[in-house]
Protein backbone atom coordinates (compact mmCIF):
# COMPACT_ATOMS: atom_id res chain seq x y z
CA UNK A 1 0.00 0.00 0.00
CA UNK A 2 2.77 2.37 1.05
CA UNK A 3 6.38 1.86 0.21
CA UNK A 4 9.33 4.16 0.81
CA UNK A 5 12.71 3.23 -0.62
CA UNK A 6 15.82 4.68 0.96
CA UNK A 7 14.33 8.15 1.38
CA UNK A 8 16.16 11.24 2.62
CA UNK A 9 14.62 14.50 3.71
CA UNK A 10 16.24 17.74 4.89
CA UNK A 11 14.24 20.75 6.09
CA UNK A 12 15.16 24.21 4.76
CA UNK A 13 16.65 24.92 8.22
CA UNK A 14 19.27 22.28 7.45
CA UNK A 15 17.86 19.67 9.82
CA UNK A 16 18.33 16.23 8.29
CA UNK A 17 15.10 14.56 9.39
CA UNK A 18 15.32 11.36 7.35
CA UNK A 19 18.59 9.63 6.51
CA UNK A 20 17.81 6.63 4.35
CA UNK A 21 14.48 5.13 5.44
CA UNK A 22 12.97 2.08 3.76
CA UNK A 23 9.63 0.71 4.86
CA UNK A 24 6.74 -1.23 3.36
CA UNK A 25 3.25 -1.06 4.82
CA UNK A 26 0.84 -3.61 3.38
CA UNK A 27 -2.82 -3.08 2.68
CA UNK A 28 -4.82 -3.51 5.92
CA UNK A 29 -1.88 -3.28 8.31
CA UNK A 30 -1.92 -1.38 11.62
CA UNK A 31 1.44 0.27 12.31
CA UNK A 32 2.62 2.45 15.20
CA UNK A 33 5.65 4.64 14.57
CA UNK A 34 7.51 5.43 17.77
CA UNK A 35 10.77 6.96 18.93
CA UNK A 36 12.20 9.97 20.69
CA UNK A 37 11.23 13.59 20.04
CA UNK A 38 12.80 14.70 16.77
CA UNK A 39 13.48 11.16 15.51
CA UNK A 40 11.74 11.91 12.19
CA UNK A 41 8.40 10.16 12.79
CA UNK A 42 6.12 12.95 11.60
CA UNK A 43 8.44 13.76 8.69
CA UNK A 44 8.26 10.13 7.61
CA UNK A 45 4.47 9.92 7.61
CA UNK A 46 4.19 13.24 5.77
CA UNK A 47 6.11 11.50 2.99
CA UNK A 48 3.35 8.88 2.82
CA UNK A 49 0.82 11.31 1.37
CA UNK A 50 2.97 13.80 -0.52
CA UNK A 51 2.74 16.55 2.12
CA UNK A 52 6.51 16.23 1.93
CA UNK A 53 8.41 14.64 -0.91
CA UNK A 54 11.74 12.87 -0.45
CA UNK A 55 14.88 14.69 -1.58
CA UNK A 56 16.41 11.31 -2.44
CA UNK A 57 14.80 7.92 -2.78
CA UNK A 58 11.23 7.15 -3.67
CA UNK A 59 7.84 7.12 -1.92
CA UNK A 60 5.11 5.02 -3.51
CA UNK A 61 1.41 4.94 -2.71
CA UNK A 62 -0.47 2.07 -4.31
CA UNK A 63 2.54 1.57 -6.53
CA UNK A 64 2.63 5.15 -7.84
CA UNK A 65 5.43 7.58 -6.94
CA UNK A 66 4.21 10.58 -4.89
CA UNK A 67 6.25 12.75 -7.26
CA UNK A 68 3.83 11.98 -10.08
CA UNK A 69 0.58 12.71 -8.22
CA UNK A 70 -0.85 15.90 -6.68
CA UNK A 71 -1.28 16.13 -2.90
CA UNK A 72 -5.03 16.53 -3.44
CA UNK A 73 -5.23 13.29 -5.39
CA UNK A 74 -3.06 11.44 -2.86
CA UNK A 75 -5.26 12.70 -0.02
CA UNK A 76 -8.13 10.75 -1.52
CA UNK A 77 -6.20 7.55 -0.75
CA UNK A 78 -4.19 8.61 2.29
CA UNK A 79 -6.05 10.67 4.93
CA UNK A 80 -3.92 12.57 7.42
CA UNK A 81 -5.18 13.64 10.86
CA UNK A 82 -2.86 16.24 12.36
CA UNK A 83 -1.58 16.23 15.92
CA UNK A 84 -3.12 19.63 16.59
CA UNK A 85 -6.69 19.75 15.23
CA UNK A 86 -6.44 23.55 14.99
CA UNK A 87 -4.00 23.09 12.11
CA UNK A 88 -6.76 21.38 10.22
CA UNK A 89 -10.08 23.00 11.19
CA UNK A 90 -11.25 26.30 9.74
CA UNK A 91 -14.96 26.13 8.93
CA UNK A 92 -17.77 27.88 10.79
CA UNK A 93 -19.69 24.73 11.61
CA UNK A 94 -18.74 21.12 12.23
CA UNK A 95 -20.99 20.11 9.34
CA UNK A 96 -19.24 22.50 6.93
CA UNK A 97 -15.87 21.26 8.11
CA UNK A 98 -16.70 17.70 7.16
CA UNK A 99 -18.44 18.67 3.90
CA UNK A 100 -15.57 20.84 2.64
CA UNK A 101 -13.18 18.14 1.47
CA UNK A 102 -16.04 16.03 0.12
CA UNK A 103 -17.11 18.88 -2.18
CA UNK A 104 -13.49 19.38 -3.23
CA UNK A 105 -13.29 15.75 -4.21
CA UNK A 106 -16.32 16.38 -6.42
CA UNK A 107 -18.97 14.35 -4.62
CA UNK A 108 -22.54 15.41 -5.48
CA UNK A 109 -24.77 17.21 -2.95
CA UNK A 110 -26.76 14.16 -1.90
CA UNK A 111 -23.63 12.07 -1.35
CA UNK A 112 -21.98 14.88 0.63
CA UNK A 113 -25.05 15.08 2.85
CA UNK A 114 -25.10 11.31 3.37
CA UNK A 115 -21.38 11.09 4.11
CA UNK A 116 -21.47 14.02 6.57
CA UNK A 117 -24.29 12.43 8.54
CA UNK A 118 -22.50 9.08 8.50
CA UNK A 119 -19.22 10.59 9.79
CA UNK A 120 -20.98 12.64 12.48
CA UNK A 121 -22.73 9.56 13.81
CA UNK A 122 -19.58 7.47 13.57
CA UNK A 123 -17.70 9.80 15.93
CA UNK A 124 -20.61 10.65 18.18
CA UNK A 125 -20.72 14.27 17.00
CA UNK A 126 -24.30 14.51 15.71
CA UNK A 127 -25.35 16.97 18.43
CA UNK A 128 -22.57 19.37 17.37
CA UNK A 129 -23.54 19.43 13.69
CA UNK A 130 -24.31 23.17 13.67
CA UNK A 131 -21.76 24.14 16.34
CA UNK A 132 -18.53 26.01 15.62
CA UNK A 133 -15.52 23.68 15.89
CA UNK A 134 -13.83 26.33 18.01
CA UNK A 135 -16.52 26.16 20.69
CA UNK A 136 -15.75 22.49 21.26
CA UNK A 137 -13.28 20.97 23.71
CA UNK A 138 -9.85 19.82 22.51
CA UNK A 139 -10.93 16.18 22.54
CA UNK A 140 -14.06 16.96 20.52
CA UNK A 141 -12.07 19.01 17.98
CA UNK A 142 -9.78 16.03 17.51
CA UNK A 143 -12.85 13.90 16.75
CA UNK A 144 -14.09 16.47 14.22
CA UNK A 145 -10.70 16.40 12.49
CA UNK A 146 -10.87 12.60 12.36
CA UNK A 147 -14.49 12.65 11.12
CA UNK A 148 -13.63 15.03 8.29
CA UNK A 149 -10.91 12.67 7.06
CA UNK A 150 -12.92 9.46 7.44
CA UNK A 151 -15.86 11.04 5.58
CA UNK A 152 -14.13 10.60 2.23
CA UNK A 153 -13.26 7.01 3.11
CA UNK A 154 -9.52 6.97 2.40
CA UNK A 155 -7.85 3.54 2.21
CA UNK A 156 -5.13 4.65 4.61
CA UNK A 157 -5.61 6.75 7.74
CA UNK A 158 -2.60 8.40 9.38
CA UNK A 159 -3.05 9.75 12.90
CA UNK A 160 -0.31 11.93 14.39
CA UNK A 161 -0.30 11.66 18.21
CA UNK A 162 -4.01 10.82 18.49
CA UNK A 163 -3.98 10.31 22.28
CA UNK A 164 -2.57 13.68 23.38
CA UNK A 165 -5.17 15.57 25.41
CA UNK A 166 -7.57 12.61 25.54
CA UNK A 167 -8.70 11.34 28.92
CA UNK A 168 -8.69 7.66 29.79
CA UNK A 169 -12.21 6.93 28.54
CA UNK A 170 -11.77 8.87 25.30
CA UNK A 171 -8.56 6.95 24.72
CA UNK A 172 -10.35 3.66 25.22
CA UNK A 173 -13.03 4.77 22.72
CA UNK A 174 -10.32 5.79 20.27
CA UNK A 175 -8.60 2.42 20.66
CA UNK A 176 -11.82 0.50 19.93
CA UNK A 177 -12.48 2.79 17.00
CA UNK A 178 -9.04 2.34 15.45
CA UNK A 179 -9.19 -1.44 15.86
CA UNK A 180 -12.62 -1.43 14.23
CA UNK A 181 -11.38 0.62 11.26
CA UNK A 182 -8.48 -1.75 10.88
CA UNK A 183 -10.74 -4.81 11.05
CA UNK A 184 -12.84 -3.31 8.28
CA UNK A 185 -9.73 -3.39 6.13
CA UNK A 186 -8.34 0.14 6.48
CA UNK A 187 -4.61 0.59 6.73
CA UNK A 188 -3.94 2.56 9.93
CA UNK A 189 -0.69 4.32 10.80
CA UNK A 190 -0.29 6.12 14.12
CA UNK A 191 2.61 8.23 15.32
CA UNK A 192 2.71 8.12 19.11
CA UNK A 193 4.69 8.35 22.33
CA UNK A 194 2.00 6.58 24.27
CA UNK A 195 3.56 3.24 25.20
CA UNK A 196 0.59 2.06 27.25
CA UNK A 197 -1.78 2.82 24.37
CA UNK A 198 0.39 0.85 21.95
CA UNK A 199 0.62 -2.04 24.43
CA UNK A 200 -3.19 -2.17 24.48
CA UNK A 201 -3.56 -1.96 20.67
CA UNK A 202 -0.77 -4.41 19.87
CA UNK A 203 0.09 -3.15 16.34
CA UNK A 204 3.29 -3.62 14.33
CA UNK A 205 5.81 -1.17 15.82
CA UNK A 206 8.40 0.75 13.82
CA UNK A 207 11.01 2.37 16.04
CA UNK A 208 12.92 5.41 14.82
CA UNK A 209 16.02 7.20 16.01
CA UNK A 210 17.79 10.18 14.47
CA UNK A 211 16.20 9.85 11.05
CA UNK A 212 16.56 6.09 10.71
CA UNK A 213 14.53 3.00 11.51
CA UNK A 214 16.24 1.00 14.24
CA UNK A 215 13.64 -1.75 14.75
CA UNK A 216 10.47 -3.08 13.18
CA UNK A 217 8.25 -5.87 14.48
CA UNK A 218 5.53 -7.03 16.84
CA UNK A 219 4.70 -4.61 19.70
CA UNK A 220 5.32 -7.44 22.16
CA UNK A 221 8.89 -7.86 21.00
CA UNK A 222 9.87 -4.22 20.40
CA UNK A 223 8.38 -2.73 23.58
CA UNK A 224 10.01 -5.32 25.82
CA UNK A 225 13.52 -5.04 24.38
CA UNK A 226 15.22 -2.94 27.04
CA UNK A 227 18.26 -2.15 24.90
CA UNK A 228 16.12 -0.88 22.04
CA UNK A 229 13.86 0.99 24.43
CA UNK A 230 16.75 2.94 25.91
CA UNK A 231 18.11 3.73 22.47
CA UNK A 232 14.75 5.07 21.27
CA UNK A 233 13.81 6.88 24.52
CA UNK A 234 10.95 4.49 25.16
CA UNK A 235 9.98 3.19 28.59
CA UNK A 236 8.59 -0.37 28.47
CA UNK A 237 4.90 -0.61 29.47
CA UNK A 238 4.25 -1.12 33.17
CA UNK A 239 3.22 -4.77 32.75
CA UNK A 240 6.47 -5.48 30.87
CA UNK A 241 8.46 -3.82 33.67
CA UNK A 242 6.75 -6.06 36.25
CA UNK A 243 7.43 -9.25 34.27
CA UNK A 244 11.03 -8.40 33.51
CA UNK A 245 11.64 -8.64 37.25
CA UNK A 246 10.12 -12.12 37.35
CA UNK A 247 11.99 -13.92 34.57
CA UNK A 248 14.11 -15.80 37.14
CA UNK A 249 10.90 -17.62 38.13
CA UNK A 250 10.40 -18.81 34.56
CA UNK A 251 7.97 -16.13 33.40
CA UNK A 252 8.38 -14.81 29.84
CA UNK A 253 9.88 -11.31 29.58
CA UNK A 254 7.70 -10.20 26.66
CA UNK A 255 4.34 -9.68 28.39
CA UNK A 256 2.70 -6.29 27.70
CA UNK A 257 -0.99 -7.03 28.14
CA UNK A 258 -2.64 -6.95 31.56
CA UNK A 259 -5.02 -9.84 30.75
CA UNK A 260 -2.17 -12.05 29.59
CA UNK A 261 -0.27 -11.09 32.74
CA UNK A 262 -3.21 -12.13 34.88
CA UNK A 263 -3.57 -15.44 33.05
CA UNK A 264 0.11 -16.33 33.50
CA UNK A 265 0.09 -15.46 37.20
CA UNK A 266 -3.16 -17.30 37.94
CA UNK A 267 -1.79 -20.43 36.22
CA UNK A 268 1.39 -20.13 38.21
CA UNK A 269 -0.48 -19.80 41.52
CA UNK A 270 -2.69 -22.79 40.65
CA UNK A 271 0.46 -24.79 39.94
CA UNK A 272 1.87 -23.85 43.34
CA UNK A 273 -1.28 -24.96 45.12
CA UNK A 274 -1.62 -28.37 43.49
CA UNK B 1 12.99 28.95 50.74
CA UNK B 2 9.92 26.77 51.21
CA UNK B 3 10.05 24.70 54.36
CA UNK B 4 10.91 21.01 54.23
CA UNK B 5 8.25 20.16 56.81
CA UNK B 6 5.65 17.80 55.35
CA UNK B 7 1.97 17.46 56.11
CA UNK B 8 2.01 20.12 58.77
CA UNK B 9 0.05 23.08 57.49
CA UNK B 10 -2.61 23.55 54.88
CA UNK B 11 -1.22 25.56 51.98
CA UNK B 12 -4.41 25.46 49.93
CA UNK B 13 -7.78 25.66 51.65
CA UNK B 14 -10.93 25.72 49.60
CA UNK B 15 -14.37 25.74 51.14
CA UNK B 16 -17.62 25.47 49.21
CA UNK B 17 -16.15 27.01 46.07
CA UNK B 18 -18.59 27.52 43.20
CA UNK B 19 -17.63 29.25 39.97
CA UNK B 20 -19.33 30.16 36.70
CA UNK B 21 -17.42 31.57 33.70
CA UNK B 22 -18.76 34.87 32.37
CA UNK B 23 -21.69 34.22 30.06
CA UNK B 24 -21.81 30.49 30.84
CA UNK B 25 -25.07 28.94 32.01
CA UNK B 26 -23.46 25.94 33.68
CA UNK B 27 -21.31 26.11 36.81
CA UNK B 28 -17.74 24.90 36.16
CA UNK B 29 -17.01 24.32 39.86
CA UNK B 30 -19.75 23.21 42.21
CA UNK B 31 -19.32 23.34 45.97
CA UNK B 32 -15.66 22.29 45.88
CA UNK B 33 -13.97 21.82 49.26
CA UNK B 34 -10.35 20.73 49.36
CA UNK B 35 -7.32 20.99 51.62
CA UNK B 36 -3.77 20.48 50.38
CA UNK B 37 -1.02 20.44 52.97
CA UNK B 38 2.35 22.06 52.59
CA UNK B 39 4.86 19.72 50.95
CA UNK B 40 2.33 17.37 49.40
CA UNK B 41 2.60 15.84 45.93
CA UNK B 42 -1.00 15.89 44.76
CA UNK B 43 -2.28 14.41 41.51
CA UNK B 44 -5.42 16.03 40.16
CA UNK B 45 -7.23 13.93 37.57
CA UNK B 46 -10.68 13.24 36.12
CA UNK B 47 -12.45 13.13 32.74
CA UNK B 48 -11.96 15.96 30.20
CA UNK B 49 -14.10 18.95 31.10
CA UNK B 50 -14.42 17.94 34.77
CA UNK B 51 -13.10 21.29 36.04
CA UNK B 52 -9.41 20.47 36.69
CA UNK B 53 -8.04 23.39 34.71
CA UNK B 54 -10.66 25.76 36.15
CA UNK B 55 -9.68 24.75 39.67
CA UNK B 56 -5.98 25.33 38.89
CA UNK B 57 -6.82 28.81 37.61
CA UNK B 58 -8.22 29.57 41.08
CA UNK B 59 -4.94 28.64 42.78
CA UNK B 60 -3.04 31.58 41.28
CA UNK B 61 -5.88 34.07 41.05
CA UNK B 62 -6.44 33.89 37.26
CA UNK B 63 -9.93 33.21 38.54
CA UNK B 64 -11.43 35.64 39.57
CA UNK B 65 -8.99 38.42 38.55
CA UNK B 66 -8.47 37.58 34.87
CA UNK B 67 -11.47 35.43 33.92
CA UNK B 68 -13.99 37.36 36.07
CA UNK B 69 -17.27 35.40 36.23
CA UNK B 70 -19.04 34.53 39.43
CA UNK B 71 -17.04 33.08 42.33
CA UNK B 72 -18.45 32.10 45.70
CA UNK B 73 -16.89 30.35 48.68
CA UNK B 74 -13.58 30.37 50.52
CA UNK B 75 -10.27 30.33 48.63
CA UNK B 76 -7.05 30.65 50.64
CA UNK B 77 -3.68 29.90 49.06
CA UNK B 78 -0.38 30.30 50.96
CA UNK B 79 -2.28 32.12 53.71
CA UNK B 80 -3.64 34.68 51.25
CA UNK B 81 -7.28 35.20 50.43
CA UNK B 82 -7.05 34.94 46.63
CA UNK B 83 -9.96 37.36 46.17
CA UNK B 84 -7.97 40.11 47.83
CA UNK B 85 -4.60 39.62 46.14
CA UNK B 86 -3.58 40.38 42.58
CA UNK B 87 -2.35 37.80 40.05
CA UNK B 88 1.12 39.38 40.45
CA UNK B 89 1.15 38.78 44.19
CA UNK B 90 -0.17 35.24 43.81
CA UNK B 91 2.51 34.49 41.19
CA UNK B 92 5.17 34.82 43.91
CA UNK B 93 3.57 31.84 45.64
CA UNK B 94 2.12 29.74 42.84
CA UNK B 95 3.99 28.80 39.64
CA UNK B 96 2.39 27.22 36.58
CA UNK B 97 4.00 24.84 34.07
CA UNK B 98 1.97 24.04 30.96
CA UNK B 99 1.56 21.09 28.61
CA UNK B 100 3.56 22.46 25.73
CA UNK B 101 6.82 24.16 26.77
CA UNK B 102 7.03 25.92 23.41
CA UNK B 103 4.17 28.15 24.51
CA UNK B 104 6.02 29.20 27.63
CA UNK B 105 9.51 29.94 26.26
CA UNK B 106 10.36 33.00 24.19
CA UNK B 107 13.82 34.38 25.09
CA UNK B 108 16.96 33.95 22.98
CA UNK B 109 18.82 31.96 25.60
CA UNK B 110 17.88 29.54 28.36
CA UNK B 111 19.49 31.83 30.92
CA UNK B 112 17.42 34.83 29.79
CA UNK B 113 14.23 32.80 29.89
CA UNK B 114 14.92 31.66 33.43
CA UNK B 115 15.84 35.22 34.53
CA UNK B 116 12.79 36.87 32.95
CA UNK B 117 10.44 36.65 35.94
CA UNK B 118 13.14 37.82 38.32
CA UNK B 119 13.94 40.84 36.15
CA UNK B 120 10.28 41.78 36.35
CA UNK B 121 10.50 41.66 40.13
CA UNK B 122 13.38 44.16 39.93
CA UNK B 123 15.79 41.80 41.66
CA UNK B 124 19.40 43.05 42.00
CA UNK B 125 21.70 41.61 39.32
CA UNK B 126 23.93 39.54 41.61
CA UNK B 127 21.08 37.95 43.49
CA UNK B 128 19.36 37.23 40.19
CA UNK B 129 22.46 35.47 38.83
CA UNK B 130 22.60 33.32 41.93
CA UNK B 131 18.94 32.43 41.67
CA UNK B 132 19.23 31.53 37.98
CA UNK B 133 22.27 29.32 38.67
CA UNK B 134 20.37 27.54 41.40
CA UNK B 135 17.27 26.96 39.27
CA UNK B 136 19.37 25.62 36.37
CA UNK B 137 21.22 23.28 38.71
CA UNK B 138 18.05 21.96 40.36
CA UNK B 139 16.56 21.07 36.97
CA UNK B 140 19.83 19.64 35.63
CA UNK B 141 20.28 22.06 32.72
CA UNK B 142 23.31 24.15 33.80
CA UNK B 143 25.13 23.11 30.63
CA UNK B 144 22.29 24.42 28.45
CA UNK B 145 22.35 27.99 29.81
CA UNK B 146 23.63 29.67 26.63
CA UNK B 147 21.56 27.61 24.20
CA UNK B 148 18.49 28.92 22.38
CA UNK B 149 15.36 27.28 23.85
CA UNK B 150 13.86 26.55 20.42
CA UNK B 151 16.91 24.42 19.51
CA UNK B 152 16.41 22.09 22.46
CA UNK B 153 14.52 18.81 22.65
CA UNK B 154 11.00 18.80 24.09
CA UNK B 155 12.22 17.34 27.37
CA UNK B 156 14.97 19.94 27.70
CA UNK B 157 12.49 22.73 26.88
CA UNK B 158 10.16 21.51 29.59
CA UNK B 159 13.05 21.65 32.06
CA UNK B 160 13.71 25.24 31.05
CA UNK B 161 10.03 26.04 31.65
CA UNK B 162 10.27 24.41 35.09
CA UNK B 163 13.50 26.30 35.89
CA UNK B 164 11.83 29.60 34.94
CA UNK B 165 9.03 28.92 37.39
CA UNK B 166 11.36 27.53 40.05
CA UNK B 167 13.56 30.66 39.93
CA UNK B 168 10.68 32.59 41.48
CA UNK B 169 10.86 30.18 44.45
CA UNK B 170 7.13 29.59 44.68
CA UNK B 171 5.58 27.58 47.52
CA UNK B 172 3.41 25.69 45.06
CA UNK B 173 3.97 24.60 41.45
CA UNK B 174 1.02 23.46 39.35
CA UNK B 175 1.98 21.21 36.41
CA UNK B 176 -0.71 20.86 33.74
CA UNK B 177 0.00 17.58 31.91
CA UNK B 178 3.68 18.50 31.64
CA UNK B 179 4.76 15.41 29.68
CA UNK B 180 2.05 15.04 27.00
CA UNK B 181 4.37 16.09 24.20
CA UNK B 182 7.45 14.22 25.42
CA UNK B 183 8.81 10.81 24.54
CA UNK B 184 8.44 8.27 27.36
CA UNK B 185 12.01 8.55 28.63
CA UNK B 186 11.82 12.36 28.53
CA UNK B 187 8.53 12.14 30.42
CA UNK B 188 10.01 9.90 33.09
CA UNK B 189 12.92 12.31 33.60
CA UNK B 190 10.53 15.26 34.01
CA UNK B 191 8.56 13.37 36.67
CA UNK B 192 11.85 12.67 38.45
CA UNK B 193 12.76 16.38 38.40
CA UNK B 194 9.32 17.25 39.79
CA UNK B 195 9.59 14.60 42.51
CA UNK B 196 12.99 15.96 43.49
CA UNK B 197 11.72 19.53 43.82
CA UNK B 198 9.03 18.16 46.07
CA UNK B 199 11.33 15.95 48.15
CA UNK B 200 14.39 18.15 48.46
CA UNK B 201 12.84 21.61 48.54
CA UNK B 202 9.49 20.79 50.04
CA UNK B 203 7.68 22.53 47.19
CA UNK B 204 4.01 21.60 47.11
CA UNK B 205 3.28 19.93 43.76
CA UNK B 206 -0.09 19.78 42.06
CA UNK B 207 0.12 17.59 38.97
CA UNK B 208 -2.78 17.54 36.54
CA UNK B 209 -2.42 14.25 34.68
CA UNK B 210 -4.37 11.59 32.76
CA UNK B 211 -1.54 9.10 32.33
CA UNK B 212 -0.96 7.82 35.82
CA UNK B 213 1.26 4.82 35.13
CA UNK B 214 4.44 6.89 35.38
CA UNK B 215 3.37 9.52 37.90
CA UNK B 216 1.33 7.65 40.53
CA UNK B 217 4.36 6.43 42.46
CA UNK B 218 5.35 9.96 43.46
CA UNK B 219 1.94 11.06 44.77
CA UNK B 220 1.01 11.48 48.42
CA UNK B 221 -2.51 12.61 47.59
CA UNK B 222 -4.91 11.96 44.71
CA UNK B 223 -7.90 14.12 43.86
CA UNK B 224 -10.40 13.00 41.23
CA UNK B 225 -12.89 15.53 39.88
CA UNK B 226 -16.05 14.84 37.94
CA UNK B 227 -18.54 17.31 36.51
CA UNK B 228 -17.28 20.30 38.51
CA UNK B 229 -17.20 18.45 41.82
CA UNK B 230 -14.60 16.62 43.87
CA UNK B 231 -15.48 12.95 43.41
CA UNK B 232 -12.62 11.39 45.39
CA UNK B 233 -9.93 12.86 47.60
CA UNK B 234 -7.40 10.86 49.60
CA UNK B 235 -4.46 8.48 49.77
CA UNK B 236 -3.36 7.14 46.31
CA UNK B 237 -3.67 3.41 47.02
CA UNK B 238 -7.15 3.75 48.50
CA UNK B 239 -8.33 5.97 45.68
CA UNK B 240 -7.00 3.83 42.83
CA UNK B 241 -8.49 0.72 44.37
CA UNK B 242 -11.90 2.28 45.05
CA UNK B 243 -14.94 1.20 43.10
CA UNK B 244 -15.82 4.81 42.28
CA UNK B 245 -12.46 5.57 40.64
CA UNK B 246 -12.94 2.60 38.32
CA UNK B 247 -16.48 3.67 37.48
CA UNK B 248 -15.31 7.20 36.65
CA UNK B 249 -12.96 5.72 34.07
CA UNK B 250 -9.75 7.42 35.16
CA UNK B 251 -6.39 5.95 34.15
CA UNK B 252 -5.82 3.49 36.98
CA UNK B 253 -2.13 2.37 37.01
CA UNK B 254 -1.63 -1.04 35.35
CA UNK B 255 -0.15 -2.54 38.54
CA UNK B 256 -3.40 -1.79 40.41
CA UNK B 257 -5.42 -3.18 37.49
CA UNK B 258 -3.41 -6.39 37.57
CA UNK B 259 -4.01 -6.81 41.31
CA UNK B 260 -7.73 -6.31 40.81
CA UNK B 261 -7.88 -8.86 37.95
CA UNK B 262 -5.96 -11.37 40.05
CA UNK B 263 -8.36 -10.88 42.94
CA UNK B 264 -11.32 -11.48 40.63
CA UNK B 265 -9.68 -14.75 39.57
CA UNK B 266 -9.31 -15.93 43.13
CA UNK B 267 -5.72 -14.78 43.72
CA UNK B 268 -5.98 -12.13 46.40
CA UNK B 269 -2.62 -10.53 47.18
CA UNK B 270 -1.97 -8.17 50.06
CA UNK B 271 -1.31 -4.48 49.57
CA UNK B 272 -1.97 -2.37 46.49
CA UNK B 273 1.09 -1.66 44.32
CA UNK B 274 1.00 1.63 42.42
CA UNK B 275 4.28 1.16 40.55
CA UNK B 276 5.83 -1.69 38.61
CA UNK B 277 8.69 -1.92 41.13
CA UNK B 278 6.26 -2.43 43.98
CA UNK B 279 4.31 -5.05 42.04
CA UNK B 280 7.46 -6.97 41.09
CA UNK B 281 8.71 -6.84 44.67
CA UNK B 282 5.41 -8.08 46.05
CA UNK B 283 5.17 -10.91 43.50
CA UNK B 284 8.74 -11.98 44.25
CA UNK B 285 7.95 -12.17 47.96
CA UNK B 286 4.90 -14.33 47.33
CA UNK B 287 6.37 -16.55 44.62
CA UNK B 288 9.98 -17.01 45.70
CA UNK B 289 9.72 -19.48 48.51
Image (cartoon, helix red, strand yellow):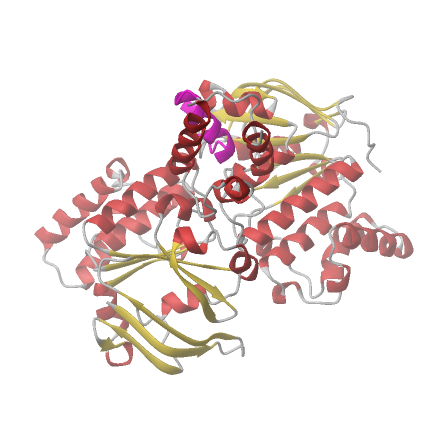
User: Residue sitting at 48 percent across and 40 percent down?
Assistant: A239
Q: Residue at x 41, y 20 (%)?
A: B266
The number of callouts visible is 0
In the rendered image, residue A108 lying in the magenta stretch gets the answer no
Using residue A50 as the reference point, say whether residue A199 is left or right of it: right
Nearer to us in this view, B86 or B288: B288
x and y percent of residue B196 in the render? 73, 42
- On the image, the x and y values in percent for residue B21 come to 50, 30
Q: Quadrant of residue B273?
A: top right
At x 55% / y 59%, what residue is drawn?
A227
Q: Nearer the viewer, residue A225 or A231?
A: A225
Identified at 17% across, 59% down, the residue is A103
Q: Main secondary structure of the magenta part?
A: helix
Give how far across and how far down residue B179 sits, in percent: 56, 48
Q: Is residue B182 above or below residue A117?
A: below
Quadrant where the C terminus of chain A sits is top left
- Specify start and end residues of the magenta stretch as a single range: B246-266
Which x, y percent locates residue A144?
A: 31, 47
Most foreground residue, B276 or B86: B276
In this view, the residue in front, A153 or B118, is A153
Q: Which residue is at the far bottom?
A: A56
Q: Is residue B124 left or right of residue B207?
A: right
Does residue B26 show up?
no
| Residue B247 drawn in magenta | yes
Indicate left or right for A150 with A209 as reference. left
Amino acid sequence: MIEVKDIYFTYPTGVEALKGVSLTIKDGEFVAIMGQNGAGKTTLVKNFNGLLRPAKGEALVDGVSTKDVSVAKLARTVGFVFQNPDHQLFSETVEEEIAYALRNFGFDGATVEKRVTWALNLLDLAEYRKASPFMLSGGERKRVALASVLAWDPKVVILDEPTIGQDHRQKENLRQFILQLNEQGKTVVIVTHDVEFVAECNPRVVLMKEGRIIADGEAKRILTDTTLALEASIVPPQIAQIFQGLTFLGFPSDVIDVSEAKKLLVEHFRGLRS
Amino acid sequence: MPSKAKHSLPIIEIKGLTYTYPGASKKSLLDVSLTIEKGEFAILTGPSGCGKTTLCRCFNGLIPHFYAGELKGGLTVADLNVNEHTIGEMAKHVGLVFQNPENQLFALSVEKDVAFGLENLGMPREQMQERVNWALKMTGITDLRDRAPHELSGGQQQRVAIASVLAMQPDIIVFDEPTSFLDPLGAQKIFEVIAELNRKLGITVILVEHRLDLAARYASHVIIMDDGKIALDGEPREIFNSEQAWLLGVGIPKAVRLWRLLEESGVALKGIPISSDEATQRLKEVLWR
